[in-house]
């Protein structure tokens, strides 16, 4: 399987944490007990990133929410979190980051050719947002946004390009993640070291 990060026709949305799987699992169980009591049952099973959505998440949040966490092969101290929400369930990622306090990043990158492209990276340290950079087009207008501490690996010269759409792309985000220690373009990153943990919402 081609890694989702390297497939331009696929929406890339993933949260990566420098924390073992058990810490994310514990955090999610506690969070769901608080915000969705009894509605996000937990199960263990195989890991398949294509199981949540084939090419991109469904628009809106009316569909039942799903979350999968796993640990990449050979990276016991790393966990990844995937959702079936278009925004990657960013509010949940924030709560998880505040629970484990380790380095965490969320990457979102739309497929090539979509009407409203988006490429963004958010980094948490100590449970707080340390850096956020984003390029997007909304209502036919491109915007670039940044806040927080500039990271040593960032190509700041690209942020001054005349065409806003050229300032950040998927390749930029992959380079930034490699600098953080996570190679999202590697098949190993998307190969689980064991069973994944799934939380699938149940609605009445």
Image (spheres, rainbow, N blue to C red):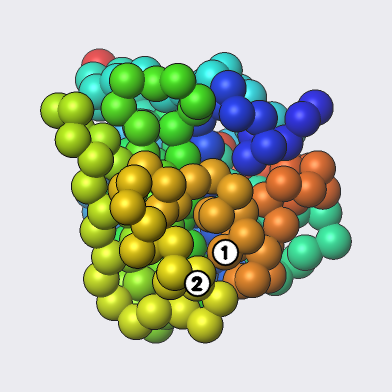
Q: Residue at x 35, y 63 (%)?
A: 160
Residue 122 drawn at (x, y percent):
39, 62
For this view, does 181 lie left or right of residue 119? right
Q: Residues within 10 Å of mark 1 (few under 14, many from 20)?
A: many
List the residue tagged with mark 2: 154
On screen, residue 191 above or below 86: below
Out of 62 and 10, give the one closest to the viewer. Answer: 10
In the displayed structure, would residue 96 be above or below residue 54?
below
Q: Answer left or right for 172 relative to 139.
A: right
Picture coordinates of residue 198, whole percent (x, y): 55, 38
Picture quadrant where residue 88 is located: top left
Whether residue 41 is visible here, answered yes or no, is: no
Residue designated by label 1:
176
User: Where residue 69 sits: x, y (%)?
Assistant: 58, 47
| Label 2 crowd (10 A; few <14 / some 14-19 / many >=20) | some
Determine contact: label 1, label 2, CB under 8 Å: yes
Q: Among all residues in the image, which is located at the extreme left?
A: 139
Q: Is residue 146 above or below residue 54?
A: below
Question: Residue 50, relative to residue 152: is it above or below?
Answer: above
Q: Nearer the viewer, residue 46 or 85?
A: 85
Query: What residue is at 81 percent from the left and 43 percent from the top?
Result: 187
SS under mark 2: loop
- Between the residue at mark 1 and the residue at mark 2, the CA separation in whole angstroms equals 7 Å
Q: Who's the residue at 64% across and 71% down the image?
A: 179
């Amino acid at each position: 399987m081609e890694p989702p990060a390297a497939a331009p026709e696929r929406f890339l949305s993933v949260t990566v944490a420098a924390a073992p799987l058990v810490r994310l699992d514990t955090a999610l169980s506690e969070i769901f007990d608080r915000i969705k009591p009894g509605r996000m049952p937990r199960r263990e099973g195989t890991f398949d990133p294509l199981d949540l959505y084939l090419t991109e998440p469904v628009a809106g949040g009316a569909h039942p929410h799903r979350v999968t966490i796993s640990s990449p092969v050979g990276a016991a101290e790393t966990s990844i979190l995937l959702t079936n929400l278009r925004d990657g369930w960013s509010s949940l990622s924030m709560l998880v980051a505040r629970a484990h306090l380790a380095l965490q990043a969320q990457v979102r990158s739309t497929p090539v050719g979509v009407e409203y492209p988006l490429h963004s990276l958010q980094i948490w340290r100590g449970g707080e947002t340390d850096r956020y950079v984003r390029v997007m087009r909304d209502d036919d207008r491109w915007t670039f946004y940044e806040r927080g501490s500039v990271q040593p690996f960032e190509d700041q010269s690209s942020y001054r390009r005349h065409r806003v759409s050229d300032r950040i792309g998927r390749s930029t985000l992959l380079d930034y993640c490699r600098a953080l220690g996570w190679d999202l373009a590697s098949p190993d990153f998307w190969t689980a070291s064991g069973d994944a943990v799934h939380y699938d919402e149940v609605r009445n």
